Image: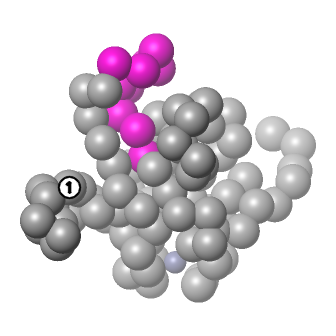
Amino acid sequence: MYHCRACGEELFRSTEKFASHCGWPSFFSPLAGDKVIEREDRSHGMVRTEVLCANCGSHLGHVFAGEGYDTPTDLRYCINSISMTLEEKEI
Ligand SMILES: [Zn+2]
Protein backbone atom coordinates (compact mmCIF):
# COMPACT_ATOMS: atom_id res chain seq x y z
CA MET A 1 0.00 0.00 0.00
CA TYR A 2 1.30 3.41 -0.97
CA HIS A 3 0.38 6.38 1.22
CA CYS A 4 0.53 10.12 0.66
CA ARG A 5 3.71 11.28 2.35
CA ALA A 6 2.07 14.52 3.47
CA CYS A 7 -1.19 13.27 5.02
CA GLY A 8 -0.95 9.47 5.12
CA GLU A 9 -3.99 8.82 2.94
CA GLU A 10 -3.97 5.46 1.15
CA LEU A 11 -3.60 6.21 -2.56
CA PHE A 12 -2.27 3.26 -4.55
CA ARG A 13 -1.84 -0.47 -4.13
CA SER A 14 1.12 -2.41 -5.39
CA THR A 15 -1.36 -4.76 -7.12
CA GLU A 16 -2.03 -1.96 -9.63
CA LYS A 17 1.65 -1.26 -10.06
CA PHE A 18 3.31 -2.28 -13.30
CA ALA A 19 6.70 -2.07 -14.94
CA SER A 20 6.78 0.91 -17.29
CA HIS A 21 10.56 1.28 -17.20
CA CYS A 22 10.19 5.04 -16.74
CA GLY A 23 12.13 4.85 -13.49
CA TRP A 24 9.26 6.01 -11.31
CA PRO A 25 6.50 3.94 -9.72
CA SER A 26 3.73 3.50 -12.30
CA PHE A 27 0.18 2.39 -11.65
CA PHE A 28 -2.67 1.74 -14.03
CA SER A 29 -5.30 2.77 -11.47
CA PRO A 30 -5.49 4.58 -8.13
CA LEU A 31 -6.92 2.78 -5.10
CA ALA A 32 -10.21 4.57 -5.78
CA GLY A 33 -11.16 7.31 -8.20
CA ASP A 34 -11.92 9.77 -5.44
CA LYS A 35 -8.52 9.32 -3.80
CA VAL A 36 -6.81 11.51 -6.34
CA ILE A 37 -7.59 14.72 -8.21
CA GLU A 38 -6.62 14.98 -11.86
CA ARG A 39 -5.90 18.49 -13.11
CA GLU A 40 -4.61 19.86 -16.38
CA ASP A 41 -1.02 20.99 -16.08
CA ARG A 42 0.36 23.31 -18.76
CA SER A 43 3.72 23.94 -17.13
CA HIS A 44 7.01 23.38 -18.97
CA GLY A 45 5.35 23.97 -22.35
CA MET A 46 3.49 20.66 -22.26
CA VAL A 47 -0.10 19.72 -21.60
CA ARG A 48 -0.13 16.94 -19.04
CA THR A 49 -2.58 15.75 -16.42
CA GLU A 50 -1.32 16.38 -12.93
CA VAL A 51 -2.28 13.98 -10.14
CA LEU A 52 -2.93 15.42 -6.69
CA CYS A 53 -3.85 13.85 -3.37
CA ALA A 54 -7.61 14.44 -2.97
CA ASN A 55 -7.23 14.71 0.78
CA CYS A 56 -4.46 17.29 1.16
CA GLY A 57 -3.76 18.52 -2.38
CA SER A 58 -0.14 17.39 -2.50
CA HIS A 59 1.38 16.96 -5.94
CA LEU A 60 1.90 13.25 -6.64
CA GLY A 61 2.88 13.00 -10.28
CA HIS A 62 1.20 12.85 -13.68
CA VAL A 63 -1.13 10.50 -15.50
CA PHE A 64 -0.65 9.57 -19.15
CA ALA A 65 -3.21 7.81 -21.34
CA GLY A 66 -3.05 5.74 -24.46
CA GLU A 67 0.58 4.74 -24.39
CA GLY A 68 -0.18 1.16 -25.31
CA TYR A 69 0.86 -0.57 -22.11
CA ASP A 70 -0.68 -3.98 -21.57
CA THR A 71 -2.85 -2.91 -18.63
CA PRO A 72 -6.64 -2.90 -18.04
CA THR A 73 -6.99 0.89 -18.27
CA ASP A 74 -4.28 2.00 -20.72
CA LEU A 75 -3.52 4.72 -18.19
CA ARG A 76 -0.18 5.26 -16.56
CA TYR A 77 -0.09 7.06 -13.23
CA CYS A 78 3.54 8.04 -13.04
CA ILE A 79 3.99 8.94 -9.41
CA ASN A 80 6.99 10.58 -7.82
CA SER A 81 8.34 8.14 -5.27
CA ILE A 82 9.21 11.00 -2.91
CA SER A 83 5.49 11.90 -2.72
CA MET A 84 4.53 8.58 -1.18
CA THR A 85 5.53 6.17 1.51
CA LEU A 86 5.27 2.43 0.98
CA GLU A 87 3.69 0.31 3.69
CA GLU A 88 4.19 -3.42 3.40
CA LYS A 89 0.97 -5.20 4.25
CA GLU A 90 -0.98 -8.27 3.33
CA ILE A 91 -3.81 -7.57 0.91
ZN1 LIG B 1 -2.26 13.77 1.00
Q: Main secondary structure of the magenta part?
A: loop
Q: Nearer the viewer, residue 44 or 80?
A: 44
Determine whether the residue tagged by mark 1 lies in a helix, strand or loop.
Answer: strand
In the rendered view, would you say 48 is above or below 73? below
User: Considering only vertical position in the picture, is 84 above or below 29?
Assistant: below
Q: Give the x, y percent position of residue 82.
A: 62, 72
In this picture the colour scheme is one colour
Q: As shown in the figure, which amino acid type bears the numbered disc 1?
A: Arg
Magenta-highlighted residues: 68-77
Q: Which residue is mark 1?
A: 48
Q: Residues within 10 Å of mark 1 (few under 14, many from 20)?
A: some
In this rendering, is residue 49 above or below 90? Answer: below
- The residue at the point 12 percent across, 56 percent down is 47
> As displayed, is residue 48 above or below residue 6?
above
**Residue 52: % across, % down:** 37, 69
Q: Is residue 50 left or right of residue 28?
A: left
Locate the C terminus and report the quarter of the image it occupies.
Answer: top right
* Percent of width and height locating residue 61: 42, 62
